[in-house]
Image (cartoon, grey):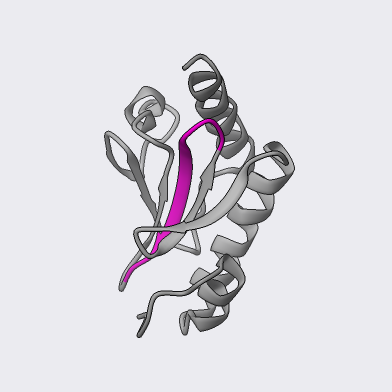
Amino acid sequence: MKAKVAATTDEYLAELDWKEAREALSRLRAIIREEIPDAIECISYGMPGYKLNGYLCGFDAFKNHCSFFPGGIALEFADELEGYKLAKGTIQFHPENPIPEALVRKILRRCVARRRSK
């Protein structure tokens, strides 16, 4: 999907050729920025990420799905994320079925609490 590593999140999103993924990830970005305005936006491992007292979260688009990486706590929300593919630090979703905004905010608050306790 991506030919080169973007230098900024704006560049990353602009280079996505999958329109629905670009829109879904742009919305996820907006939620992150609203919920954690003091987080520092970066590109980490070639994908958009956010730092707050260390790495906080990130997201990426793949061939058939998008992923939200909330830093190792995804399985804590397994009951609320039924229907999404999960791993310890990954929530996979399709752009037409994004993670509900209220749940993203809840996950982000947990990420922030964990980072601030370190």
Residue 45, quarter of the rendered image: bottom left
Residue 65: image x %, image y %?
A: 36, 64
Question: In front here: 42 or 94?
Answer: 42
**Above/below status of 96 relative to 6:** above
Q: Is residue 94 left or right of residue 14?
A: left
As drawn, is 31 to the left or to the right of 50? Answer: right
Principal SS element in the magenta part?
A: strand
Residue 55 place in picture, x, y as percent: 45, 39
Q: Residue furthest left?
A: 87
Residue at (64, 35) in percent of width and height: 102
Find residue 51 and report its horizontal and vertical position in percent. 53, 41
Q: What residue is rendered at 55% in x and 62% in y?
A: 25
Q: Which residues are magenta?
A: 52-62
Q: Is residue 108 above or below residue 91?
A: above
Q: Is residue 56 magenta?
A: yes
Is 7 situated above or below 32? Answer: below
Where residue 34 sits: x, y (%)? 73, 44
Residue 40 is left or right of residue 64, and the answer is right
